[in-house]
């Protein structure tokens, strides 16, 4: 079901005309209302009237998380406090949260976008939606909550924690839809198993998972253990919260980005130049309709690729690939951009290969070298030298096929890859040490 | 007729082999035979021990990757050409020797050699027909 059939199936030309009108209005507005943007636009030598086509987007300055921090707390708000009806915040790694604001119209837009999101996942009136995203400053819980109400389905605002009680509620209240992080979904499955509860006997049909990166392998595992269709949702509080992009249940292949409200670009995180469709790069979003907290060319740091091909569901909205990693993690090996997550997904496709690996980047003469240390476990172990060497060569050729970069695979003992705080240190860049 | 061999994946780092023998020694496991196949990056340690299950358990608990392979222990006459006569029989039948190594201890006058074949059952049948003595697992663990 398409919630807003007119907006979600606009022919590309009409969509672009709408985007341009909204972009022009946005630049006009922030130039006059937010001193930060006026300064940045003046520095870039761009006046609002210079935006004549979507191609002019490239001339506009980027906005980063650091810019938001520099204007803490409310310096980037574009309306007076009398018009603001809600403030959320994401937890900052530096101690201070990143606050974001909404006018009543922003909340209405957000609710509509979340209703579209739920609808794309096959949720409808009559469904019971169990929301286990946290309620509070975090946008997850309330974002979903208002979307479910807007759609007209029943909401159970469970929020996070008390996992055993959540399993009980799933059994007793019979929700048909589960919304939470993918890792919490798997944790629920574990706890349910301990409690002797089989998800096969619950009414759950659809799961909408996001707020952290996950993989296709994790999707298979969640679907097998929870007996539901698991769909990926993307959003970030700076842009609006959940409701930026979502997979449709028909294709389950890429997340439709609500382009009539969010103008996407994919850029090379080093050169900052736009990349053609299909190429992996950093997602940049311009909010076209937000009133309280608009953002011009916001660098999300999330790595994905965009696909404008039509989708079987009927939506004309472009699709972004599942988030592949963070741009801060990108490595440049002999001129090729490589993300650790790409290596990880190649490794995970090889049966028996444990997802424990480490990338060691070095430079021999003028050439960058990339060594992939892979832990050998019982599934891949062979007691013959040629068996293990064949495994190493197989991994090397797979990586070469997928990433067009030559690597050397070194087999190492289990647990020999150093782990800090339970998480493996994935990259050792020796070039930085010697440079 | 088959003998259980435990194999251990080792990185080519100083002290790893010593660590394996130390772990087994502390658990009271006796090593009957051993061979190390190594490359510049890694090695595969193959062991015949008196208690396979215990060896496997203690090595795994120390984080080693271990595997189990079935091999054959053959009594080879300890005289010139003794080994060649055994290898001849196998070569004629087209059976490949993946690897072999000698037992430390002798059995009387003869040597005991561990073989890994690509076709274990066929090799055993063939050698038995030729009158060559193959040890039973229990015999080997106690040698
Ligand atoms: Zn679709």
Image (tube, rainbow, N blue to C red):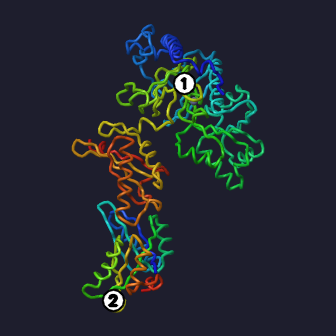
Picture layout, residue A18 above or below residue A99: above
Q: Is residue A176 visible?
A: yes
Picture layout, residue B61 above or below residue A290: below
Where does the image place residue A8, in percent across and percent down from the top left?
59, 22
B87 vs A383, left or right, is left
Picture layout, residue A1 above or below residue B106: above
A251 vs B112, left or right, is right
- The reply to whether the residue tagged 1 has its Cβ within 8 angstroms of ligand 1 is yes
**Element under disc 2:** loop
Where does the image place residue B118, in percent across and percent down from the top left?
39, 70
Discs 2, 1 touching: Cβ within 8 Å: no
Where does the image place residue A383, in percent across and percent down from the top left?
40, 66
Where does the image place residue A357, in percent across and percent down from the top left?
42, 51
Residue B116, located in which quarter of the rendered image? bottom left
Residue that lies at the very extreme toward the left in this rendered image: A365
What is the CA distance from the residue labelled 2 to the residue labelled 1? 79 Å
Label 2 marks a residue whose chain is: B
Label 1 marks a residue whose chain is: A
Residue that lies at the very extreme toward the bottom in this rendered image: B108
A305 vs A170, left or right, is left
B80 or A78: nearer the eye? B80
**Crowdedness of circle 2 by 10 Å Cα count: few (<14), some, many (20+)?**
some
Residue wearing tag 1: A317
Picture layout, residue A388 above or below residue A365: below
Residue that lies at the very extreme toward the top in this rendered image: A49
A427 vs A123, left or right, is left
Residue wearing tag 2: B110
């Amino acid at each position: 079901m398409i919630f807003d059939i007119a907006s979600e199936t606009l022919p590309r030309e009409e969509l672009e005309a709408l985007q341009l009108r909204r972009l022009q209005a946005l630049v006009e507005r922030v130039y006059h209302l937010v001193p930060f943007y006026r300064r940045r636009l003046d520095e870039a030598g761009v006046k609002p009237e210079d935006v004549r086509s979507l191609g002019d987007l490239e001339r506009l300055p980027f906005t980063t998380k650091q810019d938001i921090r520099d204007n803490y707390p409310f310096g980037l708000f574009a309306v007076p406090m009398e018009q603001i009806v809600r403030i959320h915040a994401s937890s900052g790694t530096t101690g201070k949260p990143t606050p974001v604001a909404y006018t009543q119209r922003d909340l209405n837009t957000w609710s509509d976008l979340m209703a579209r999101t739920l609808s794309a996942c096959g949720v409808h009136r009559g469904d019971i939606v169990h929301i286990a995203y946290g309620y509070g400053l975090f946008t997850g819980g309330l974002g979903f909550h208002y979307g479910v109400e807007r759609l007209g389905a029943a909401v159970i605002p469970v929020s996070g924690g008390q996992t055993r009680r959540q399993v009980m509620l799933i059994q007793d209240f019979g929700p048909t839809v589960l919304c939470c992080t993918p890792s919490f979904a798997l944790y629920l499955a574990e706890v349910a198993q301990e409690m002797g509860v089989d998800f096969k006997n619950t009414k759950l049909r659809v799961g909408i998972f996001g707020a952290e990166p996950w993989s296709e392998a994790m999707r298979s595992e969640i679907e097998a253990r929870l007996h539901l269709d698991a769909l990926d949702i993307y959003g970030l509080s700076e842009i609006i919260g959940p409701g930026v992009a979502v997979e449709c249940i028909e294709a389950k292949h890429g997340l439709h980005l609500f382009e009539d409200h969010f103008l996407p670009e994919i850029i090379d995180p080093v050169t900052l130049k736009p990349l053609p469709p299909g190429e992996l790069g950093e997602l940049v979003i311009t909010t076209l309709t937000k009133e309280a907290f608009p953002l011009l060319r916001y660098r999300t740091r999330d790595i994905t690729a965009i696909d404008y091909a039509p989708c079987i569901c009927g939506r004309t909205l472009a699709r972004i690939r599942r988030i592949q990693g963070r741009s801060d993690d990108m490595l440049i090996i002999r001129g090729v951009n490589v993300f650790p997550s790409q290596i990880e997904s190649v490794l995970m496709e090889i049966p028996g290969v444990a997802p424990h690996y480490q990338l060691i980047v070095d430079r021999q003469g003028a050439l960058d070298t990339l060594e992939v240390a892979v832990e050998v476990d019982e599934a891949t172990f062979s007691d013959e030298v040629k068996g293990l060497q064949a495994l190493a060569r197989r991994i090397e050729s797979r990586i070469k096929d997928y990433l067009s970069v030559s690597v050397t695979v070194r087999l190492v003992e289990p647990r020999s890859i150093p782990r800090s705080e339970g998480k493996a240190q994935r990259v050792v860049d020796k070039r930085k040490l010697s440079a | 007729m088959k003998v259980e061999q435990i194999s251990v994946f080792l990185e080519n780092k100083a002290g790893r082999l010593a660590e394996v023998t130390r772990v087994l020694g502390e658990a009271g496991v006796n090593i009957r035979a051993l061979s190390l196949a190594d490359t510049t990056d890694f090695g595969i340690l193959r062991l015949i021990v008196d208690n396979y299950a215990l060896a496997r358990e203690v090595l795994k608990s120390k984080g080693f990757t271990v595997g189990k392979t079935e091999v054959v222990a053959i009594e080879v006459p300890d005289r010139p050409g003794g080994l060649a006569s055994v290898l001849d029989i196998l070569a004629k039948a087209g059976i490949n020797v993946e690897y072999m190594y000698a037992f430390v201890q002798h059995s009387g006058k003869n040597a005991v050699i561990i073989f890994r074949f690509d076709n274990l059952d066929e090799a055993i049948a063939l050698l038995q027909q030729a009158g060559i003595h193959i040890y039973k697992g229990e015999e080997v663990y106690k040698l």
